[in-house]
Image (spheres, helix red, strand yellow):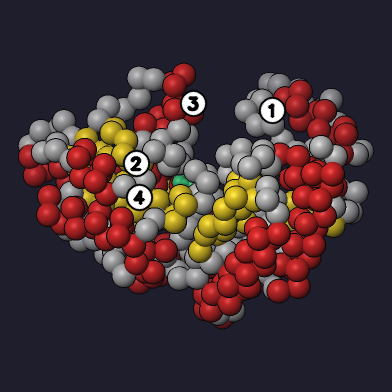
Amino acid sequence: MMDISNVEKTVLDAKECIQRTEDVIMHTYNRYPLVWDKGSGVYLYDIDGKKYLDFVAGIAVHALGYENKKWNEAVKAQIDKLTHISNYYYSVPMMEAAEKVIKSTGMDRVFFTNSGTEAIEGAIKTARKYYYDKHKKADSEIIAMEHSFHGRSLGALSVTGTKKYREAFEPLIGGAVFAEYNNLEDVEKKINDRTAAILLETVQGEGGVYPATKEFIAGVRKLCDEHDIMMILDEIQCGMGRTGSMFAYEKYGLKPDIVTIAKALGCGIPVGAFATTKKAAALVPGDHGTTYGGNPLATAAVNAVFEQFEELNVLEHVKEIGDYLYEKLEELKNRYDCIQEHRGLGLMQGLEFTVPVADIIKKAIEKQLILINAGTSVIRFVPPLVIQKEHVDEMIEKLTASIEEVQYNK
Ligand SMILES: *Cc1c(COP(=O)(O)O)cnc(C)c1O
């Protein structure tokens, strides 16, 4: 038995925490030197008690902000009752969460996972199984998009359109073909009689905050219908109210055959899902599984998220505050030559700079504002969905000062 009695329990300060963490945690992230201690509303506090405005939300996770009382209570109550039972049995929280996902997505069947990546894995397996059932052969292809992001597992990586993420880990799963996002002609060219699915983010997140055009999404839907191909929309980042509708595809007036969800689905409890139409629900007993997925704790969190979305009228709020953020970022873009483009929907917006944004983000941290990039030249704005105008104003003020100072120093 390992002796852990000599592991010191009290952390004295941020510096010590960072040093001790780097000594033991695998170095797969270059972290900011910030040690978070607690969250409240749309603010985070570091271990010295310093308060920061949060425009990252744990990467589009904390839709409800921090310390939502009802979510906290629901999760705590479920911990006291029962957290896990495995998927050999039923539970009321899973039933309710599944009903909510089905109702809000317009799909017919759902499978709960522990992450977005796993939701992608399930979606790919579903499309492959549908193809296999139909053609009685296992040689299907999936068309995915350049600059997409779907996760880091070997399957999700295979359909992620950033070469540097994939390269060292090849050979990945076969049959992935890449097309240019928002280029319908390119997608059409890549369809053949082995194509099982077309996979895309309704709004590309990591790739730089690019919403799909109406023509593109509608065209992909049409191609999928014509060829009996599964249309998979990855709404892991842009779903759950982020764009002002529960799912971004509602804005385009259509539905996919398969949708993937995660990030804000649990608002801090790890949970994801993929949902399909009845026709696309090709997985049967023995085809797929998970130990934790959909357990009572995770699905109690999901239920609380949906309930809070209703109670707080989150979608209406996102529309209003998203417009306000849009207006303010547009002003900023018009003011600075170093900002070349402004894109986005609802509370998922991006500013593309002509320069790398790392220095601006570092400056913002000095001013107690946290921001996140998407690639080297885009600042991505994915705050908690419950932010108010005053928080947008505070962010704009701090960002403006950061841009000024960074430019000044050049
Ligand atoms: C974050 C993200 C994923 C991966 O989700 P994880 O929960 O990190 O596994 C997949 N697709 C999109 C669009 C994402 O933003």
Give the foreground label among 1 and 2: 2
Dot 2, crowdedness within 10 Å: few (<14), some or many (≥20)?
some
Mark 3 to mark 4 CA distance (whole Å): 22 Å
Q: The N terminus lies in which quarter of the figure?
A: top right
Task: Say which amino acid is labelled 1.
Answer: Ile
Mark 1 to mark 3 CA distance (whole Å): 23 Å
Disc 3 under 8 Å from ligand 1? The reply is: no
Given residues 149 and 212, the one toward you in this image is 212
Q: Earlier in the sequence, mark 1 or mark 2?
A: 1
Q: From the viewer's perspective, is residue 244 above or below residue 29? A: below
Residue to which mark 4 is pinned: 182
Q: Earlier in the sequence, mark 3 or mark 4?
A: 3
Label placed on residue 180: 2
Task: Say which amino acid is labelled 2.
Answer: Glu
- Residue 129 in the image, given as x and y percentages of width and height: 19, 42
Given residues 287 and 41, the one toward you in this image is 41
- Residue 229 in the image, given as x and y percentages of width and height: 18, 49
Q: Is residue 343 left or right of residue 118?
A: right
- Residue 249 in the image, given as x and y percentages of width and height: 37, 64
Task: Say which amino acid is labelled 4.
Answer: Asn
Q: Secondary structure at mark 1?
A: loop
Q: Are marks 4 and 1 in contact (CB under 8 Å)?
A: no
Residue to which mark 1 is pinned: 25
Q: Secondary structure at mark 3?
A: helix
Q: Are marks 2 and 4 in contact (CB under 8 Å)?
A: yes
Task: Say which amino acid is labelled 3.
Answer: Lys
Q: Secondary structure at mark 4?
A: loop
Q: Are marks 1 and 3 in contact (CB under 8 Å)?
A: no
Q: Secondary structure at mark 2?
A: loop
Q: Is residue 240 left or right of residue 392?
A: left
Label placed on residue 164: 3
